Image (tube, helix red, strand yellow):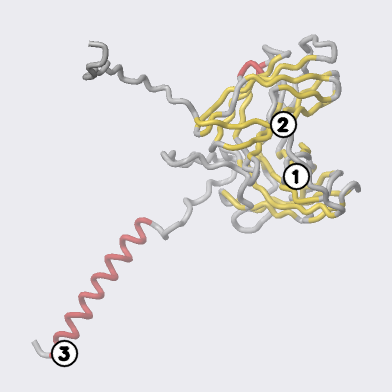
């Protein structure tokens, strides 16, 4: 075969290879591309489950084709201010349609990095998609803002996070030590249960008044007799927490309210329980440690080994 023939054969082979690759790429789609978003009002299919580690929420500013655009990035400690933000879709447009979850279209959580300051806010939205809420934060330092919402037509909610700076004279504050009992506004709240890393854990909170009498008049708040937020110390990962059915259906008005929390790892966590009595909402805070989840698999019985020692014979 002369040189011209060799070049022609090589060019033809390259054409076949690139044509095949193009066909495969067109069938599979671009590497790393997300599936096409569902139309408004059309439920989205949940992502395929994996056997990988649990991924906590709140660590990303963008997820699921949505971005938290925090317009207010700094406030002054001890002074009333206003937080403004916009949730944007994959095209950068402001989102104006949401599902209602726990009685609201969007829940806003603000927590200091040392987890000693916590606010659960319910901002209002204008027609152009801008959310805003008044807020007064007492201490200077670094804060994390979480927007918890369900986009219109979606089956699963999103929790997006962004950083906020509160200026002023900063004083380091130590996180309270782990304890199963705390007091707030004259009420004593007791925690029964513990977080277990790598799975779900049941937590029950019991509310008593200042005389020690169980409170049986808890009022519904955000669709249940209590609302719980759990944050991991360090990175402020936001745990998935759900109230038990009896807390949502009205069959239990206290003194106990129970939740299931999904914990991604061992470590220190802060729990913030909102409960409502006589028309007023109170927040009880706990520090707790998440341990390794105990195994539930039965261990095989082993026959005792025969001793080969001659002592005593």
Q: Earlier in the sequence, mark 1 or mark 2?
A: 1
**Quick one: label 1, few (<14), some, or many (20+) residues within 10 Å?**
many
Q: Is residue 105 visible?
A: yes
Determine the residue positioned at 73% across, 43% down. Answer: 114
Q: Earlier in the sequence, mark 1 or mark 3?
A: 3
Residue highlighted by disc 2: 272
Residue highlighted by disc 1: 112
Measured Cα–Cα span from mark 1 to mark 2: 13 Å
Say above or below: 258 vs 75. above
Give the number of the mark in front: 2 or 3: 2
Image spot of residue 238 (x, y percent) = 63, 40
Q: Earlier in the sequence, mark 2 or mark 3?
A: 3
Say above or below: 174 vs 24. above
In the image, farthest residue toward the bottom: 3
Residue highlighted by disc 3: 4
Determine the residue positioned at 44% across, 41% down. Answer: 52
Q: Would residue 199 be found to the left or right of residue 138 on screen?
A: left
Foreground pick, 274 / 125: 274
Measured Cα–Cα span from mark 1 to mark 3: 73 Å
Q: Secondary structure at mark 1?
A: strand
Foreground pick, 116 / 54: 116
Locate residue 306: give its quadrant.
Answer: top left
Please state, as top left, top right, bottom left or bottom right, where the N terminus lies in the image: bottom left
In the image, farthest residue toward the right: 79
Q: Would residue 87 be found to the left or right of residue 36 on screen?
A: right
């Amino acid at each position: 075969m002369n040189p011209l023939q060799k070049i022609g054969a090589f060019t033809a082979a390259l054409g076949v290879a690139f044509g095949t690759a193009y066909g495969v790429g067109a069938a599979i789609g671009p590497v790393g591309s997300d599936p096409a978003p569902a139309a408004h009002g059309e439920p989205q299919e949940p992502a395929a489950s994996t056997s990988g580690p649990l991924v906590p929420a709140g660590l990303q500013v963008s997820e699921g084709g949505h971005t938290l655009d925090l317009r207010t990035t700094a406030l002054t400690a001890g002074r009333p201010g206003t937080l403004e933000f916009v949730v944007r879709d994959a095209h950068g447009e402001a989102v104006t349609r949401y599902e209602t979850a726990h009685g609201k279209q969007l829940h806003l959580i603000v927590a200091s990095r040392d987890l000693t300051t916590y606010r659960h806010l319910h901002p209002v939205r204008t027609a152009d998609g801008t959310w805003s809420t008044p807020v007064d934060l007492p201490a200077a330092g670094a804060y994390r803002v979480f927007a918890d919402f369900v986009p219109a037509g979606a089956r699963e909610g999103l929790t997006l996070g962004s950083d906020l700076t509160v200026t002023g004279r900063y004083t380091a504050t130590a996180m309270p030590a782990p304890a199963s009992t705390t007091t707030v506004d004259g009420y004593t709240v007791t925690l029964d249960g513990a977080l277990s890393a790598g799975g779900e854990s049941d937590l029950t909170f019991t509310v008593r008044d200042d005389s020690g009498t169980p409170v049986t008049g808890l009022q519904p708040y955000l669709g249940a007799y209590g609302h719980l937020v759990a944050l991991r110390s360090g990175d402020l990962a936001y745990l998935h927490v759900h109230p038990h059915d009896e807390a949502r259906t009205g069959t239990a008005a206290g003194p106990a309210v129970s939740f299931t929390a999904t914990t991604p790892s061992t470590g220190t966590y802060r729990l913030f329980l909102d409960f409502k009595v006589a028309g007023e909402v109170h927040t009880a805070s706990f520090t707790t440690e998440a341990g390794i989840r105990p195994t539930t698999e039965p261990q095989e019985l082993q026959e005792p080994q025969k001793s080969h020692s001659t002592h005593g014979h």
